[in-house]
Amino acid sequence: MAQLRSYIVGNWKMNGSAADVTVLQAIADAAAGHDGVDVGICPPATLIAAFASAAGPVQIGAQDCHAKASGAHTGNLSAAMIKAAGATYSIIGHSERRADQGESDADVNAKAQALQAAGMGAILCVGETLDERDSGNAIPIVTAQLAASLPDSADGDWLSVAYEPVWAIGTGRVPVAGDIAAMHAALRATLVERLGEAGKGVRILYGGSVNAGNAAEILALPDVGGALVGGASLKAESFVPIIEAALR
Ligand code: PGA
């Protein structure tokens, strides 16, 4: 199979305001000069519409969507709603939502199917806690999380996976390269076991304290198809070098 295009996505979490469209524009200018890499930004939902109209080649995504198409779900947004606002995909199953909102693998699986049904993409997040890493069982735990969160209809045309160790998110701590490579190999094996040939076309991103200094090493690892970036995506000066590292 041909090498998959690198995919570098910024997750702004609960940060950013309308004035930060200037940050998006600087990222868009850089992305326009680097057409070998897919670049995305997932702003808060309130900014999706404004960002979508200023995004150039940057793909605008949401940070979550509800599994249902409509109904009595106060505060939630359906896939069709975020699509109408201008998002073309959504992050689902981020560990902060799994922890804060109690989202289960089954919930995440249903969200993925809702996105596919709406003609949208998904970035499905998985990852172990520090206790799970220290127990020595991170690989079976995270591959089981993926297997349960992944719809049978998944393929790389609409779904990517993001491996994000919970203990590496926002902490400045990153697994050693060998541990990232071992997890990505195990996730690839899980994808191929479940999806057959289509499992080879699913990009597996790494996330957790990616920055301009460590991106090149991480992105060069086998089966690392890109990065999901939190803190370092909030400013063009720290995000653009990560895009550039994906081109090497
Ligand atoms: P971080 O966040 O890059 O700030 O560690 C990554 C994420 O949560 O997606």
Image (cartoon, helix red, strand yellow):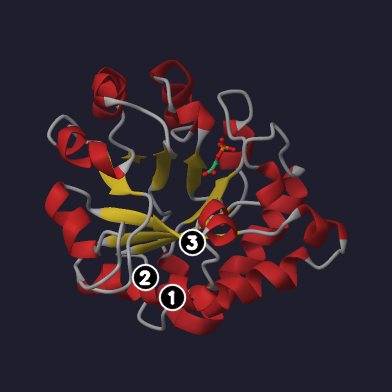
Q: Earlier in the sequence, mark 3 or mark 2?
A: 3
**Would you say 131 lies left or right of 77 here?**
right
| Rendered location of residue 175, percent (x, y) | 74, 44
Looking at numbered disc 1 in the image, what kind of residue is underneath it? Answer: Asn
Element under label 3?
Answer: loop
The relative height of residue 115 versus residue 152 in the rendered view (above or below) is: above
Q: Tag 3: residue type? A: Gly
Q: Which residue in the structure is indicated by mark 2? A: 112
Task: Write down the quadrant of residue 145 in the picture.
Answer: bottom right
Residue 235 falls left or right of residue 57? right
SS category of the residue bearing label 1: helix
- Residue corresponding to mark 3: 93
The verdict on label 3 being within 8 Å of ligand 1 is no
Residue identified by numbered label 1: 109
Q: Which image quarter has ligand 1?
A: top right
Q: In the picture provided, is 185 more to the left or to the right than 86?
A: right
Residue 242 image position (x, y, % from top left): 48, 29
Going 31% across and 29% down the picture, which residue do you hit? 34
The amino acid beneath tag 2 is Ala
